[in-house]
């Protein structure tokens, strides 16, 4: 009997292509799914429009891709270290001070649907996308043991740029939020990386957004 041929090695370009595709999709996914579905379904399918209004439609799409992707950070809960807790405490305290005393970063959302989407469903979709998928794939391209900051910086830039779609791609209206979300994305990414858990990063993200809403 002939010897079995060795299994072909995976192409080194595949992780880069996946990372590029997911990163580009992140810049448009909430606008293309939630906003466009809401506009289309507003009078045709009110229930679907309500799901889109709550960002459940994009969460379902992102969650499906997340579940089917092998190179992802897990959602499972994990106990953060003392260093991670200190970084989170400093960030959240700084956020509270900026919002409560100076009004910088406050997001006024009078509608309940917008508050739920901002604090819960939307933030979960962003974490699955930017930390679960983008950061997970970036760590394949730039392993933390070799390049400890490259994957974090890359996912933070994608996270900040992603917020442009919430302002209908008007940079003049979005630049302040993008400037705020760049360091926020780094903190959330650091939490996900150190705990190996998107779930912990999501909890921090939720607390951050609640401060921005109600502080």
Image (tube, grey):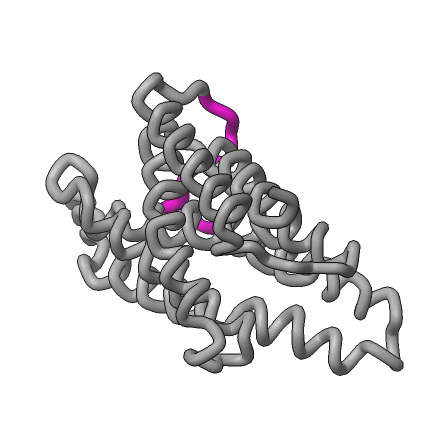
Query: Which quadrant of the view contains residue 3?
Result: top left
Q: Is residue 1 visible?
A: no
Give the magenta-colored segment's residue range. Answer: 69-78
Query: Which quadrant of the view contains residue 30?
Result: bottom right
Q: How many marks?
A: 0
* Foreground residue among 15 and 130: 130
Answer whether residue 71 is magenta in the image.
yes
The residue at 42%/28% (across/down) is 89
The residue at 14%/44% (across/down) is 147
Answer whether residue 9 is magenta in the image.
no
Horizontal placement of 34 versus 135: left or right? right
In percent of width and height, residue 55 lies at 68, 60
Name the quarter where the N terminus is drawn: top left
* Foreground residue among 133 and 124: 124
Name the quarter where the C terminus is drawn: top right
Q: Is residue 130 above or below residue 37?
A: above
Query: Which quadrant of the view contains residue 181?
Result: bottom left
Q: Main secondary structure of the magenta part?
A: loop
Residue furthest left in the image? 146
């Amino acid at each position: 009997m002939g010897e079995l041929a060795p299994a072909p090695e995976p192409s080194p370009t595949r992780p880069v292509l996946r990372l590029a595709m997911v990163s580009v999709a992140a810049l448009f996914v909430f606008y293309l799914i939630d906003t466009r579905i809401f506009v289309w379904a507003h009078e045709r399918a009110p229930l679907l429009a309500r799901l889109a209004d709550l960002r459940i439609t994009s969460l379902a799409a992102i969650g499906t891709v997340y579940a089917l992707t092998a190179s992802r950070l897990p959602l499972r809960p994990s106990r953060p270290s003392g260093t991670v807790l200190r970084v989170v405490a400093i960030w959240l305290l700084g956020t509270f001070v900026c919002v409560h005393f100076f009004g910088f970063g406050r997001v006024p959302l009078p509608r309940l649907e917008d508050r739920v989407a901002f604090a819960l469903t939307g933030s979960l979709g962003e974490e699955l996308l930017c930390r679960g998928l983008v950061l997970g794939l970036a760590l394949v391209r730039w392993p933390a043991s070799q390049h400890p900051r490259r994957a974090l910086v890359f996912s933070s830039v994608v996270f900040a740029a992603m917020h442009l779609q919430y302002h209908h791609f008007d940079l003049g209206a979005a630049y302040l939020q993008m400037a705020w979300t760049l360091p926020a994305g780094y903190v959330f990414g650091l939490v996900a990386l150190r705990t190996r858990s998107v779930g912990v990063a999501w909890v921090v993200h939720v607390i951050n957004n609640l401060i921005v809403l109600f502080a």
